[in-house]
Image: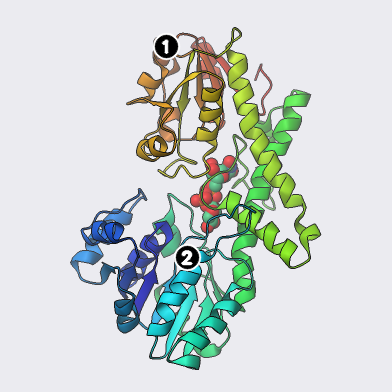
Amino acid sequence: MHAISVLGCGYLGVTHAACLAELGHDVTAVDIDARRVAALADGRVPFYERGLQELVTRHLANGRLRFTTSYARAAAEADVHFICVGTPQRGDGAADLRSVDAVVEELGPRLTTESLVVGKSTVPVGTTARIAERLRRTAPAGAGVRTAWNPEFLREGHAVADTLRPDRIVLGVTSASDEKVLRDVYARLADAGVPFVVTDPATAELAKSAANAFLATKISFINALAEVCEAAGADVGGLADALAHDPRIGARSLRPGVGFGGGCLPKDLRALQARARELGVGHALAFLAEVDAVNLRRRERAVDLVRRQVPDGIAGRRVAVLGAAFKAESDDVRDSPALHVADALRRDGAEVAVYDPKAMANARRGHPDLHYAADHRQACAGAHAVAVLTDWPEFRDIDPRELGGVVARRSVVDGRGALDPEEWRRAGWAYTALGRPAAL
Ligand code: UDX
């Protein structure tokens, strides 16, 4: 058992803190936002993530997990400190490291005994070395304060499962003793057979950025072929299926549709390019700009398909957008393709009614100009076009005959390849999907 602090109580931090408690550790989780800390200390998780609320409730009750605004407590109570703050995108595409730096400034002067500071946030390669240097100067314990990087690879919606049963654990360390501390922290996962990759901090930092850039490239690859399918009269759904059976390619992150969004892939893709440019090797990753461009073009294509459903124009017409979250099983709307499309349609003059099973509050906050409906049926009432833009199972299960009775025009754009075209057509709908010829 280790005494651990987790610095930052966002999505990553709360998940990591609760999972470390689940692994048997004693965890102090810190955030500078007093309201957030008060809610968490009261057992209320401020976002939706399957299984997380239960973990937080259980470990608050048994005393293994606590939330505080006090860095002094974190420094006094723990000897392993995980940096879990956000690294959002700056105006120029690079990562904004102000929160990471603020944590280091707060924590450093309070580290009076030997300790290990471990970064988890996604950062530009070279950050660990910079932080190590800063801590050596600010921490009273001096060289007794060690630094390592241990990136997370969790997916939203599966964060607890991904943390407790990860594909791999990457440790970027500079000494065998630091490696031992981290192997101890994750001993239960090692016992369960999770593979460890032990490397230097710079490689560990890159591992995360590279993994996300690869996933984004894979998604944009199939979406680029969707453009070709549209031009050639082929079906990207069948194409993806044909590719996926090759075990070297695989089905995951190969689902065509309105593209990737969220708090990670888009920004990490840009931050990696920005860092490569700083390092003088921008040309090596120049293709990632096209990965980004393909992704954004899918959103425009979705807008265009919806427009075409209403021959006399969408201005003044009701359009239903089903989905606001950037993906199913999440209430996160950051850089959500669904809301991007909804907003473009609104700017075209449509009266856009949005429904999402989990992300309504977040969507409303960021897009107060859209209309919000209590359920998918209400969103579709009187609609001249329906667009399915997040792949929630609830939308797959919609009965097209029943829904056909409430819309003004039976016209659906499937932005995620989520619906059964035959079933919808049999129910009298004009069904259109990204990457599919009209007849398929
Ligand atoms: C991603 C990485 O998967 C994860 O390893 C990393 O730690 C953080 O970034 P996440 O953003 O939660 O996780 O979602 P992911 O499931 O990868 O989906 C990202 C976006 O791509 C979503 O908008 C999703 O709808 C879209 N997507 C995903 C596709 O369009 N097609 C796919 O085949 C897969």
Going 44% across and 34% down the picture, which residue do you hit?
367
Identify which residue, 346 or 162, lies in the foreground: 346
Mark 1 Cα-neighbour bin, 10 Å: few <14, some 14–19, many ≥20: some
Q: Position of residue 89 (x, y in %)?
A: 57, 54
Q: Position of residue 322 (x, y in %)?
A: 45, 28
Please tell me whether residue 224 is drawn above or below residue 172 in the rendered image: above
Q: What scheme was used to colour the molecule?
A: rainbow
Going 54% across and 34% down the picture, which residue do you hit?
340
Which circle's residue, 2 or 1, is located before the other in the chain? 2
Residue 241 showing in the rendered view:
no
Residue at disc 1, CB closer than 8 Å to ligand 1: no
Q: Amino acid at mark 1?
A: Gly
- Number of disc labels: 2
Q: Which mark is residue 382?
A: 1
Answer with left or right where residue 386 lies relative to residue 297: left
Where on the picture, by quarter, is residue 45?
A: bottom left
Mark 1 secondary-structure assignment: loop
Q: Which residue bears the numbered disc 2?
A: 99
Please tell me whether residue 408 is drawn above or below residue 282 in the rendered image: above
- Which residue is outermost to the right? 283
* C-alpha span from label 2 to label 1: 46 Å
Q: Amino acid at mark 2?
A: Ser
Residue 218 showing in the rendered view:
yes
Please tell me whether residue 246 is drawn above or below residue 58 in the rendered image: above
